[in-house]
Structure formats: C-alpha cells, structure tokens
Image (cartoon, rainbow, N blue to C red):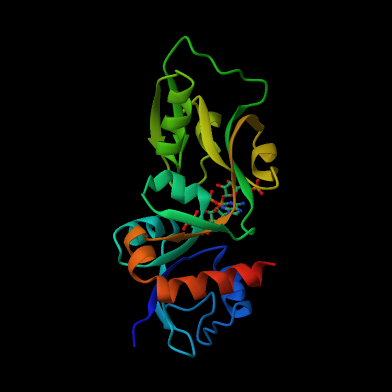
Amino acid sequence: MESITLALAKGRTSEKSIALLQNAGFHFDDFHDQTRKLVFYDTEQQIKLISVKALDVPTYVENGAADVGIVGKDNILESQSSVYELLDLKFGKCKLVVAGLTEQKLNTKTKLTVASKYPSVAKIHFESKGIPIETIKLNGSVELAPLIGMADFIVDIVETGRTLRENGLSVIEEIEDVSTRLIVNKASFATKSALLEPFISKIKNALE
Ligand SMILES: Nc1ncnc2c1ncn2[C@@H]1O[C@H](COP(=O)(O)OP(=O)(O)OP(=O)(O)O)[C@@H](O)[C@H]1O
Ligand SMILES: O=P(O)(O)OC[C@H]1O[C@H](OP(=O)(O)OP(=O)(O)O)[C@H](O)[C@@H]1O
C-alpha cells in the first residue's frame, strides 16, 4: 500500500508535532523524545515518519525523499528550499531577530559582522536593507559572539527574551515571526493528491 513519508524535526517541537498527528488520528505508539529510532509507522501504516535534524527537513521535502515535513519557519527560510508551505501549526512560536549590545545602533559605515545559526537569513535581511555583512556561522550560544567582540550583531531566535536579557543584549530589529509549519513537496502535491489531501485536511481539522 502506498504511504506518505513525513519528515519530522527532532528537538523541542517534536512532542507537540506527534500530539497534533495523534489528534488528527495518526498514532505513533513507539515515539517518545528519548528514543534513538529514526523511522516510525503509525498504527494504520498510512504514514512513514522519519525523524531528522530540523534544518534538514526542508531539504528532504524539496528532494522528494519526504512528501511532507513539519518544521519551524526559521529553518524553512534558512534552507531556501522550494516547497509549498501549507499550514501554520501555531506552536513553536518565537521570533527571528537582529540583536546586539543594548543601545547599539546599526552602523552602516563599516562592514558589519553578524554571527548566527541562520547565516542565509542574516545575509538576505541585511542585503535587503543595502547593508553588506560578513557572516559567522555558529551552532549555538550565539549570544556570546557580541560579548566577546567576535561579531557586531547576531541573528537568532527569541522566545521569552531571557537569554538576551541575561547577556546584556537587546532586540534591534524583528525579522520574522516563527512557528512550526506543514510543508509539502511540489511534485507529491500533484501526484499523490489522493493521499495528501485527506491527510492535510485531517491536520487542518485537528488545529481548529
Ligand atoms: N526558544 C526557542 N529557541 C529555539 N527554537 C525555538 C524556540 N522556541 C521555538 N523554537 C522552534 O523550535 C525549533 C527547534 O528547536 P531546537 O532547539 O530543538 O532545534 P535546533 O536548534 O535546530 O537543534 P539543535 O539545538 O540540535 O541545533 C526551532 O527551529 C524553532 O522553530
Ligand atoms: O528568548 P529565550 O526564551 O531565552 O529563547 C531563545 C534562546 O533559545 C535558543 O537557544 P537554545 O536553547 O536552542 O540553545 P542553543 O544556544 O544551544 O541554540 C535560541 O538560540 C536562544 O538562545
């Protein structure tokens, strides 16, 4: 029987994603956040779920290795993948922002250095304002970069604002609201519509 392959972002949004799938009628009984398994099937064997690094989800979906994906808008933007973004799942809410030392202004006279887990988002954002930047890719603790003089600014996720506050940084500009999204491979959307349409509408109903 033909099934849907779903790429699910590992990490802090995975439990909520599984709960949403459950509310939509798809049960993954052997999934839990400590598991080392990477492939799961729902009890009805309608969905093959692959658990992958969040930033890789759009890549799997763009290449057709997965028909659908559940991933944050931050990673969709960073990957610059060509996929359909169909539903806002309304959890994993946070913001992508430019942040820097409190009171620091964007200085366009010299070339700025911006540290981020999201170097493409950073480049596109500053270029859209006509400001050329050097980016430094970091994989975490990004808030350190301006404190130790490695970068002028950071582009990062802010949720409660606590990490910025505790490090003497503040938001300079907001770039984009982030939440978890349902994305779909463009070819699958056409060729597997008989399977995907009911799946998408069940997820949509579970959100209401
Ligand atoms: N406070 C937050 N910090 C980071 N991400 C958040 C936050 N709130 C919601 N999110 C969302 O959760 C997603 C997953 O976050 P998580 O920290 O698990 O992944 P990651 O940073 O890609 O993984 P890793 O830490 O292994 O590199 C983010 O991509 C974002 O969409
Ligand atoms: O506004 P807040 O509620 O403080 O949340 C934002 C922080 O959470 C994330 O980091 P994460 O916990 O993923 O750790 P990391 O530094 O290893 O990326 C993000 O990169 C910020 O540092």
Give the residue displayed 65% in from the left and 38% down from the top. 164
Q: Is residue 110 above or below residue 27?
A: above
Res. 187 image quadrant: bottom left
The picture quadrant where one finds residue 65 is: bottom left
Residue projecting furthest to the top: 109
Q: Residue at x 66, y 47 (%)?
A: 159
Above or below, 125 against 47 in this view is above
What residue is at 33 percent from the left and 68 percent from the top? 191
Provide residue 82's location: percent of width, then percent of height.
36, 49
What count of labels does the image hold? 0
Horizontally, is 117 left or right of 14 in the view? left
| Lateral position of residue 83 relative to residue 147, left or right | left
Instruction: Return the x and y of residue 146 as percentages of the image width and height.
Output: 53, 29
Residue 88 position, x and y percent, is: 59, 56
Residue in the picture at 43% in, 88% down: 45
Is residue 49 visible in the rendered structure shown here? no
204 vs 43: above or below: above
Q: Is any atom of residue 135 visible in this view?
A: yes
The quarter of the image holding the C terminus is bottom right
Nearer to the camera, 193 or 155? 193
Horizontal and vertical percent for residue 110? 44, 12
Residue 106 vs residue 86, the one in the foreground: 86
| Frontmost residue, 102 versus 195 | 195
**Image position of 90 with respect to 155: above or below:** below
Q: Quadrant location of the N terminus? A: bottom left
